[in-house]
Amino acid sequence: MLHSAKQIAEHATFQAFINSYLREANCGYWMEREEWIQEQQPSIPLSGDSVVEIELPGQTTVFAVEVIYRSRTGRHLIGSAVKYCSQRREWIQHDRLPMMIALIHELHLMAKSNGCHELASHFDELVLRLIESYQIMASYVEERMNDKISLYSEESTFIEAEQSLLFGHWLHPTPKSRQGMAGWQHPHYAPELKGRFQLHYFQIDRELVREASASQNRASEIILHSLKKSIPHLTVPHNNCLIPMHPLQAQWLLQQNHVREAVEKNLIKDLGPMGAYYSATSSIRTVYSPEKEWMFKFSVPVKITNSLRTNRLHELRAGTEMTKLKDKLRFTEKYPSFRIIDDPAYITAELPGQKESGFEVIIRSNPFPEREDKGISSIAALVQDPLPGERSRLQRTIERLAQAEMRDPQEISMDWFEKYWRCSIEPLLRLYDEHGLALEAHQQNSVLDLSSGYPEAYYYRDNQGYYLSNSYRGNLCELLPSLAKCPELFYEDDLIQERFTYYLFMNQLFSVICRFGQDSLFSEDLLIEWCREQLGHLEKELSRQGKAFIAHILHSEKLAYKANLLTRFHDVDELLAKNEQAVYTYIPNPFAISKKEENYAEAASAAV
């Protein structure tokens, strides 16, 4: 069956949105398909395992969707949608986009009825972003439908994996929302369209420049040295520095009054685009070149999923401080398959009246240069749904290993998963227990070295995602006194554990388990049980906050979940909110459910 790009994008949008709605707004009324068909007698054939009814009392409407695959980890595979027609007293087929808009309208009506008129007023923004995300996704799919080798090959490079996320964040209702990027700019700057571009450079009076580095080389020296590799005869006056900028940010900066004034006073000179060509990674604002030693992370005037993406001063400082702390802790020496990608330097221009001028640049180490970039993939790319008729990256990897080793794919799957756990999940938990450092290790921030097919190393990336425990503050500041000047890096353990629960378990681990289940490679139930056993062993072995955190994960009835749909509905920009706090909710804990079922089985066995 042939699928158009619009059909594929609509299907992917529907998966993301309905799963978000079921988790965050209304869990619906679930029934086995046969039972529902017997009770409702629909004239439309349904093929899913289950059916879930979603009642919209504000609109006196009832929808039902078939569930092709019901996931224990909460990300179901959704099929057709039907609506009950009270006039005809029957279920009728319903288009997906109008249904999603109706569900947003229901959130709007709920907010109004609860007296939250300010929240209700944001529903148009969510409708706008939903449609924009769907249309952008359709354009990307249209462009890449015949590019399946670079989309799914296990042999692909780091940047090819970064450019393969056609459907985006699978726990977000508007995964490709990119407000602020014009249609003509996508082919240049959207990673999915494989654009390449030069950076835009500004020459800035050194008196205005603020920079720091955890290494011997200053940020300005790193930038100049990197650019001179492309332009050997480049000279810069001794009292000036060069600052590279993303072209989108450069266009925005040149329209700002504080920049125009500095240009008129000859404090800033616009040099335009020059030097090597870079490609956007999956975050859009971090750029990469396989020939370069460094990546650059910029602010961009684009709202991506939830937030306007801007580098804050405390994030710049976090990168340098955490590079120093990582070297002091020497944790990665103890666990060599676990690595943190450094953000060791930053540079910006300080302009009158501006806390952040817009020139903030984070310099990131590039561990994946040319000839060392094969088989490197984010977990997001690994677990992403494939295009119709294709297999996911993970499935292709497992099948290739099974063929090469002449072993059962289930055996390979279990070995693969155990190696993944050992280089990723376990070190992340140990890092928190031993040093009070939790990382925002979601699937896009988590990169695996799969050059052998198996996970050989895990890389964490993101200077915005460090959480230092207040209960470890004394020890950490004694080890690195300059941390005392970064109070924004420290959090109470209750908040850390809420976020760590979502990022490490809900977003990263459960996405891998779900992919194994949906691809029929290995049972979700068995993987959840295996994880629970490993967590039990770790709980006995650890002694500090990691121990308490694991106890919470194992024994809580519900776990914290970042509610991306409600965050969008409330129009929260989490990067601007206090503590960068999105909307959180709680959903059933698969580990607790697993334990309940085991206890029930033991009781039944004893009764017999």
Image: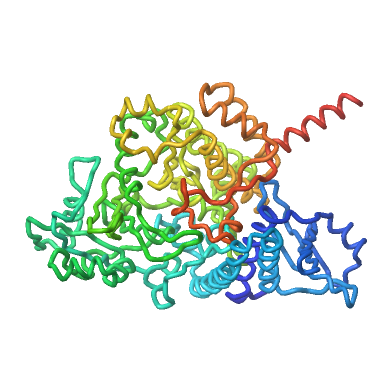
Give 555 or 36, whichever is nearer the viewer: 555
- Could you tell me which quadrant the C terminus lies in? top right
Instruction: Point out residue 12 in the picture as x, y percentages from the top left corner.
Output: 61, 65
Give 516 or 239, whichever is nearer the viewer: 239
Could one spot residue 546 in this view of the protein?
yes
- Identify the residue shown where x is 64% and y is 60%: 116
Residue lying at the far front in this picture: please name it: 115
**Colour mapping used in the image:** rainbow
Instruction: Point out residue 231 in the picture as x, y percentages from the top left corner.
Output: 15, 63
Residue lying at the far left in this picture: please name it: 238
- Identify the residue shown where x is 66% and y is 70%: 101
Could one spot residue 419 in this view of the protein?
no
Give 242 or 93, whichever is nearer the viewer: 242
Can you tell which quarter of the image residue 32 is in? bottom right
Q: In screen coordinates, is 564 left or right of 179?
A: right
Can you tell which quarter of the image residue 555 is in? top right
Instruction: Point out residue 125 in the picture as x, y percentages from the top left corner.
Output: 55, 69
- Identify the residue shown where x is 57% and y is 72%: 131
Total marks shown come to 0
Q: In screen coordinates, is 346 left or right of 62?
A: left
Give the vertical position of 328 relative to 296 (above or below).
above
- Could you tell me which quadrant the N terminus lies in? bottom right
Instruction: Point out residue 91 in the picture as x, y percentages from the top left corner.
Output: 85, 71
